[in-house]
Amino acid sequence: MPAAPVPRRNGRRDGPAFVTVPIYLDAVRRLHGMGPGEMARALRVSPSVLRRWGRGTLVPSWRRLRAMTGLWGGSAELLALGAALQRYSRATGISIEDAVRMVRSGRRNPPDRRPSGPRRDRRQLSLPIGG
């Protein structure tokens, strides 16, 4: 069964109109039928770095973004925008969708976040050993 078309509102598609590195890598993997090992070799990085890029825990440099788009196509500038949004959302703790809304609205300050509750002390306690 084909996927349902994305509903349009005011002539624009709903959903993100930006490309993050994990979305791009997933699309490359599906379109070109490449495995993670092949992609890592093509970019001259280790497979663990490629996995971290795919999970979004690490964001590649501008040079790597240009290499990706040079190999598999796409806009390096658009991919760099998605990477910058990833970096900003990781640094501030807001979601990528909120970061996109900020860019679209022209806001300079992030949305107010209420603390999720009392902060727990996560330091380990030293316990006496032996007697």
Image (cartoon, grey):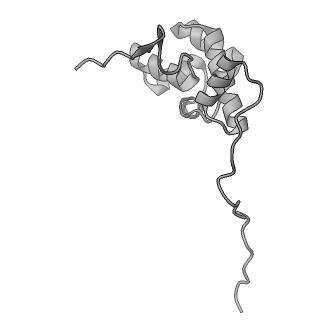
From the viewer's perspective, tell me whether residue 30 is left or right of residue 81: left
Q: Residue at x 31, y 18 (%)?
A: 4
The residue positioned farthest toward the left in the image shown: 1
Q: Residue at x 61, y 21 (%)?
A: 44
From the viewer's perspective, tell me whether residue 122 is left or right of residue 82: right
Residue 60 visible in the picture: no
Q: How many marks?
A: 0
Q: Quadrant of the C terminus?
A: bottom right
> Residue 30 location in percent, x, y?
40, 19
> Residue 89 location in percent, x, y?
67, 32
The residue positioned farthest toward the right in the image shown: 108
Q: Residue at x 69, y 47 (%)?
A: 114
Residue 101: quadrant of the picture: top right
Residue 102: quadrant of the picture: top right
The relative height of residue 17 versus residue 46 in the rendered view (above or below) is above
The residue positioned farthest toward the front in the image shown: 10
Residue 70: quadrant of the picture: top right
Residue 3 visible in the picture: yes
Q: Nearer the viewer, residue 22 or 52?
A: 22
Q: Residue at x 68, y 36 (%)?
A: 90
Q: Nearer the viewer, residue 82 or 66?
A: 82
The relative height of residue 49 versus residue 14 in the rendered view (above or below) is below
